[in-house]
Image (cartoon, rainbow, N blue to C red):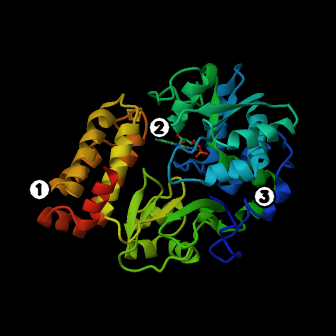
Amino acid sequence: MSLLTDVRAPAPAVLPRLLGDAGMRAAGRARPVRRGALTTMLDAAGLRGRGGAGFPVAAKVRAVRRATGLRRPVVVANGVESEPLSHKDALLLRSFPHLVLDGLTLLAHEVGATRAYLGVAAGAVEVDDVTAALHRRPRDVEVEVVEVPHRYVASESSALLSWIDGGAAVPYVRPPWEAERGVGGRPTLVHNVETLAQVALLAYYGVHWFRAVGQPDEPGTFLLTVDGAVATRGVYEVAAGTPLADVLERAGVALDADTAVLTGGYLGRWLRGAAVRSASVSRAGMDAAGGALGAGVVHVLPPESCPLAETARVATYLAEQSAGQCGPCRYGLAALAEAMRALAWWPDADAQAANRIRRWGEMVKGRGACRHPDGAGGFLVSAVDAFADHVDGHVGHGACAAAARELRSAR
Ligand SMILES: Cc1cc2nc3c(=O)[nH]c(=O)nc-3n(C[C@H](O)[C@H](O)[C@H](O)COP(=O)(O)O)c2cc1C
Ligand code: SF4
């Protein structure tokens, strides 16, 4: 997937900044600022993490600085991107590795770390790009590139830290939080690679420049992976607050009352018709419409596909990809995936199936060591809500022709 080669010319819905001229000029040039000054800038800029949870970066930096004491902290860049529908982090690492490394170095200076790690998917081509970029940089912060095994939950922050420490790439129960006790028992700051690139831009151009686009409560830009039934697939950089409909129009989608979009990724939410039109690209703008910004995924379902069959396929994948070590994943996700498969494919799905999915989808939330079951449960509930007419059709008449076709081709 590429950026800008796919996007014909800048338009209001697409604003290359991080991945445009501004990023190009800044890459490799951001210099450390006085200790403490970067945290003040992060606060003033209102920068939030781009890895999914959207936590304020300044608050995470402060927590690590508070916990440091006599132990030297560690900084970790999360570029693993295990979400199958997301390609923004890989593109960023391939195109602008120095921006990511600038952000990593700046945050290392800010918290007093001399050691950092950059996690990437095992065998990814980005490993070479990042390694080559590292050879051309000063060694004031020692950065080790760590290849992480392919599993959806391996990129969750505690799983990543466990892997760096020589353990299994599966999440662990917190507390202790990584800010207090992470890699090697040291205070650890973990950020997504897009977040780090945004930190580099902020340090280079300043708060005023950073806030010049986006919204007062959600400034700056987001990288979106726009994919599926679109004319122009690609990674789009979009100002916060841009209507989702403008992004889709830019990607060549003719919206109608049935257009279905998976927002955020596999742990995200389905939006359909009017909800797609009401959504905008920000955490609040997506939440208000019933969607999710998550990892910046915008995936348009092909009109000939059965949304229940697609949801059942993803639910099966998410259940298999959990670490299987907590009740909500081992039993909850397995049962949810089974219920969704029954609804999508069985000839005798019962009228209570959707309500059961709603109930179980709520029950798994907040009960695992990580947020995997919360996201997966929310994703399934959004499917039965957004596609209630399809649910009625399947319950009344069995699997639709599209679902049956997909089942045959999967066999
Ligand atoms: C199942 C699961 C998978 C995740 N995968 C990723 C990932 O691929 N990349 C990422 O940056 N964050 C991922 N996260 C979020 C991280 O745990 C963490 O919040 C993030 O790396 C912090 O970076 P940020 O503050 O810059 O957003 C995942 C979370 C969960 C629950
Ligand atoms: S909640 Fe699920 S994915 Fe997360 S640690 Fe527990 S079993 Fe693994």
Q: Which mark is residue 153?
A: 2
Q: Is residue 380 visible?
A: no
Q: CA distance from mark 2 to mark 1?
A: 33 Å
Question: What residue appears at the point 65 percent right and 71 percent down from the top-left corner?
Answer: 14
Q: Is residue 354 left or right of residue 45?
A: left
Percent coordinates x, y for residue 383 in the rendering: 31, 60
Task: Residue 30 in the image: state x and y as whole percent.
Answer: 84, 48
What residue is at 43 percent from the left and 36 percent from the top? 370
Dot 3 crowding, Cα within 10 Å, few <14, some 14–19, many 20+: many
User: Is 374 in front, or is 390?
Assistant: 390
Q: Secondary structure at mark 1?
A: loop
Tag 3–tag 2 contact (CB < 8 Å): no
Are dots 3 and 1 in contact, CB under 8 Å?
A: no
- Cβ of mark 2 under 8 Å from ligand 2: the answer is yes
* Residue drawn at x 40%, y 73% as measured from the top left: 259
Residue 90 shows up from this direction: yes
Q: Is residue 31 above or below residue 257?
A: above
In depth, the one of 77 and 258 nearer the eye is 258
Q: Quadrant of ligand 2?
A: top left
Give the percent coordinates (x, y) of residue 209. 77, 63
Of callouts 3 and 2, which one flags the residue occurring earlier in the amino acid sequence? 3
Q: Quadrant of the N terminus?
A: bottom right
Instruction: Name the residue carrying label 3.
Output: 23
Residue position for label 1: 348
Q: Gap between marks 3 and 2, in whole Å?
A: 30 Å
Tell which of 175 and 386 is nearer to you: 386
Number of disc labels: 3
